[in-house]
Image (cartoon, helix red, strand yellow):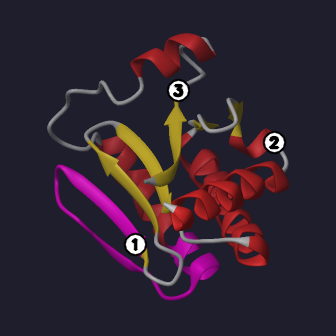
């Protein structure tokens, strides 16, 4: 289980259409515009996160921050971010602040918009605290069960 963030193209589609189409990109290779954006994203992401592993090939690009479990990836034309429900309390707030900051970088470099299906809001337009509360309560639930 993870806290998921999808990056949607709201320049071309209304929010509800972009949500419905999320994850349906059938391209087998990463489009050149996302490859170019990835080359701008990764140095900024590494500056933000510190130690992270970056990898990929023509079909997939990925960044893995082992300390938080945060993963940013591109598969075909789909961009997504995931964080496992490991974090509670102040740690949840710190991790979700990283998620928000990284999402802002991805938005700036790709023109896509970060959508948070857990809260039903665009991520960078909603308070970090709301996402941290979802992370905290779900992590507590996962721990119990």
Is label 2 or label 3 in front?
Answer: 2
Q: In the displayed structure, would residue 136 be above or below residue 36?
A: below
Residue 79, by quadrant, is top left
Q: Is residue 85 visible?
A: no
Badge 3, how many Cα within 10 Å: few under 14, some, many 20+? many
Q: In the displayed structure, would residue 17 be above or below residue 96?
A: above
Magenta-tinted stretch: 43-64
Q: Assign a secondary structure to mark 2.
A: loop
Residue linked to disc 3: 9
Residue linked to disc 1: 64
Q: Is residue 52 magenta?
A: yes
Q: Which residue appears at 84% of the width and 56% of the height? A: 129
Image quarter hosting the N terminus: bottom left
Q: Is residue 10 magenta?
A: no
Q: CA distance from mark 1 to mark 2?
A: 24 Å
Q: Which residue appears at 33% of the width and 63% of the height? A: 62
Q: Earlier in the sequence, mark 3 or mark 1?
A: 3
Q: Are marks 3 and 1 in contact (CB under 8 Å)?
A: no
Q: Residue furthest bottom?
A: 51
Q: Assign a secondary structure to mark 1.
A: strand
Q: Which residue appears at 55% of the width and 64% of the height? A: 144
Residue linked to disc 2: 126
């Amino acid at each position: 289980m993870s806290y998921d963030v999808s990056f949607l193209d709201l320049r071309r589609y209304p929010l509800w259409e972009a949500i419905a189409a999320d994850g349906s990109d059938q391209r087998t290779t990463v489009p050149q515009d996302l490859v170019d954006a990835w080359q701008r994203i990764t140095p900024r992401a590494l500056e933000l996160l510190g130690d992270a592993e970056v990898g990929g090939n023509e079909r997939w690009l990925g960044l893995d921050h082992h300390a938080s479990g945060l993963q940013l990836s591109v598969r075909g034309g789909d961009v997504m971010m995931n964080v496992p429900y490991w974090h509670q309390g102040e740690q949840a707030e710190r991790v979700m602040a990283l998620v928000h900051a990284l999402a802002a970088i991805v938005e700036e470099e790709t023109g896509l918009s970060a959508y948070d299906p857990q809260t039903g809001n665009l991520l960078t337009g909603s308070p970090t605290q709301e996402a941290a509360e979802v992370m905290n309560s779900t992590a507590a639930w996962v721990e119990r069960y």
